[in-house]
Image (tube, rainbow, N blue to C red):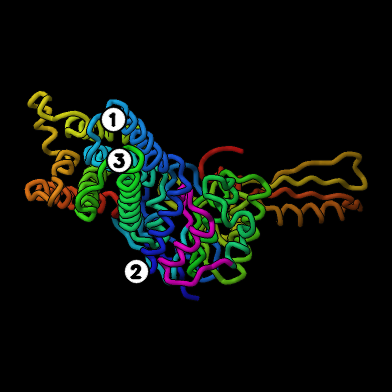
Amino acid sequence: MASSITAENLRKAYGKKEVLRGVSFCIEQGETFALLGVNGAGKTTTIEIIENMRRADSGGVTVNGILGVQLQSTSLPETITSSEAMRLFCAWHKVPYRGDLLERFDMAGEYLNMIYAALSTGRKRRLHLALALCHNPSILILDEPTAGLDVEGRHALHDEIRKLKSEGVSILMATHDMSEAETLCDRIAILRGGVITKLGSPLELTASSDIQSKITVKTRGSAEYKTFSAINTADFLTEFLLKVKAENDEITDLRVERADIEDIFLEAAGGAK
Amino acid sequence: MKAIITQLVIQFKSDLRDKGILMVYYLVPMLFYAVMGGIMKTLSMDTGASLTLSITIFTVSMSAYLGMPATLVKAREQGILEAYRAAGIPSWSLPFAVIVISTLHIMIAAVIIMASAPYIFGAVLPKSIAAHLLTVLLTALCSQSLGALTACFVKKQNTMTLAAQCLFLPSIMFSGIMFPAELLPKPMQWIGEVLPATQGARLYGGACLQLLPLAVLAGITVAAFTVSAALFRKISERK
């Protein structure tokens, strides 16, 4: 499968501070890829280099496709209406007016002629996403797409991202939201201090972790729940089942709490949950 | 071409919804016009062509220094320029649209003043309406070139408000539109000489366009717009 974006050994310093120290990854066609990291980890710089908004000191980026971009801190003139903004963006991209996108992102009706300053944060995000898609990009870059949104707004935007993914759009998103990355993305790269410290699918990342799983079991023969910790959950459970069988006992309840992306992120960042 | 026309139309429409812009381009100049016209009429002063010219130069200076640059600085401060660039819209399109539409606002206000002053305050129409409007246009472009240049050096809106006063107040005080410039101390007269308002007030002497003020205005306009464009390119290029 061809790569939509390939970043090779990106390096960038602001003065003496090295923000990126050799970041490499590739995003396959139709893949949703997350860059996770704390503030200052280099997410936005990486994204801006890919968007051609910033120049890397060394390394290179290859983009195979048309880019659509939603910046982290983005804005429009306060008194422009949603329909005017769409008309403007479509005119510059030489495509017909995309009222369908405004409808799709629930920006039609009363919102169509509402000025930008009067829109809520959620509506502004929807509008920016619609504008980023006006020229049918095959690759979408989203920088903190759900920052500042309420739960409802976040869910609505997640649904749209899933729809775009099902349409085959490659998506690169930078986010602080672990659950967002875990539920929406095929692969996640954790950036720390300008380098990728972990890269893989959410399952691969959690499986490769050294963080112990918490296993809570109740057997017919015991009055209370017992809690165990194990790094290799499969080995522990196999052994535990054999032991229970050997004792002629029976498991009545079992709960396994594995490390999630937040644990992996904190492990990679050297913190604790 | 279609894109830039669309942007100009949208810029004009969105400006008309902006109370701040309406205030700077129309409301305050018209209030000043009403007050000054009223005073001149009450004192039975010769309103002749001087009222139209004074108020028009005031309007030009206010719009070019207090209105247009603030819009540019706001666009930069709020990340609008970056959003346009990220979307593949050329960075120059926004300042271009802002300056063109600002010029249009100035011309509309100038026509309102020119057309209404004879009826309301007994002022006389300029001998040549075309020459009068050309004077306004050239003064507006020259003033806006200085406004745009200032906006290139300023990153914050509140700093822009202060910087704009450094152009606006001398334009009003030293250009001779409020009182004769000859009464001012020499240093103030010298400062006045390089201001578009002074040259604009001299440009149309009632019969034809004067050559020297025309040359000064054209020189300032070309130089300031050239430097502004170079600075703006530097501001908006990849970091």
Question: Which residue is disc 3 drawn over?
Answer: B59
Q: Residues within 10 Å of mark 1 (few under 14, many from 20)?
A: some
Local secondary structure at mark 2: loop
* Quadrant position of the N terminus of chain B in the picture: bottom left
Question: Comparing marks 3 and 1, which lies closer to the viewer?
Answer: 1
SS of the residue at dot 3?
Answer: helix
* Residue situated in front as seen by the camera: B209 or B125: B125
Of callouts 1 and 2, which one flags the residue occurring earlier in the amino acid sequence? 2
Left or right relative to A172: residue A49? left
The three-letter code of the residue at mark 1 reads Met
Amino acid type assigned to the residue bearing label 2 in the image: Met
Dot 3 or dot 2, earlier in sequence: 2
Residue at the spot x=55%, y=56% of the render?
Answer: A127
- Disc 3 versus disc 1: distance between alpha carbons? 18 Å
Q: Residue at x 10, y 23 (%)?
A: B185
Pointer 1: what residue?
B40
